[in-house]
Image (cartoon, helix red, strand yellow):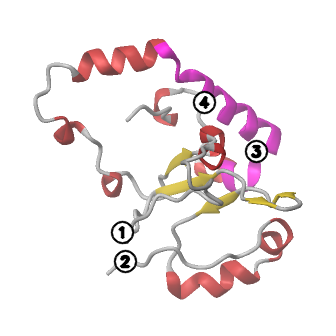
Amino acid sequence: MGAAASTNHEDAPNLAEVISEAPLSRLATFVRKLTSSVTEQTLDNTLTMLAPIRNRWKAHPSLDALPPLSFVLTDWRSSKMCDVDFGFGRPAAFRQLSDVVLENMVTIYPPLKSGDGTQGLEVMVPFEKHALEMLIQDSDMKRFFDFRGIEACPP
């Protein structure tokens, strides 16, 4: 797994800044800095570090061991999975199928394709089921997002 971690950057915004204090431009600039920090060289360095480890699964970070309010974001927007022709058709959507909910994992899927273009991004966010209605009814959420359903529930 290659990742950009905010813990590797001294100017990472704290939770209060992310929630309400920092202007969106600062947060967007920081996210761009994070994504730009993962380069071919950082990937090569990670592979060199992992090469001597016999069982690499033991080196995989456990997401549920992250500090409270931490999250990991996976972004699949540029994967172009829906453009691949498998000989019997092209996918209409791309999913990471799982029946396990990773509490700290946010996933951004590529835009769905439809007859009239794209329908925008899909974002999968782990959220406590008992508070789901509060999220769906939030005015900012209604303004920017459409709730598309529950993808997985923990056992």
Distance CA(mark 2)–CA(mark 4): 30 Å
Residue visible at 56% across and 55% down? 88
Residue identifier under label 2: 154
Distance CA(mark 2)–CA(mark 3): 33 Å
Give left or right: position of 98 versus 123: left
Residue visible at 89% across and 60% down? 116
Residue identifier under label 3: 22
Relative vertical location of residue 49 with respect to residue 65 in this rendering, above or below: above
Residue identifier under label 4: 35
Comparing 93 with 45, the one in front is: 93
Relative vertical location of residue 45 with respect to residue 115 in this rendering, above or below: above
Q: Are marks 1 and 2 in contact (CB under 8 Å)?
A: yes
As shown in the figure, which amino acid type bears the numbered disc 2? Pro
Residue visible at 57% across and 64% down? 125
Q: Residues within 10 Å of mark 4 (few under 14, many from 20)?
A: few
Q: Is residue 107 magenta?
A: no
Q: Earlier in the sequence, mark 3 or mark 1?
A: 3
As shown in the figure, which amino acid type bears the numbered disc 1? Val
Quadrant of the image containing the C terminus: bottom left
The secondary element bearing badge 1 is classed as loop
The residue segment tinted magenta is 18-40
Numbered circle sitting on residue 17: none
Q: Position of residue 143 (x, y in %)?
A: 86, 70
Give left or right: position of 119 versus 147: right
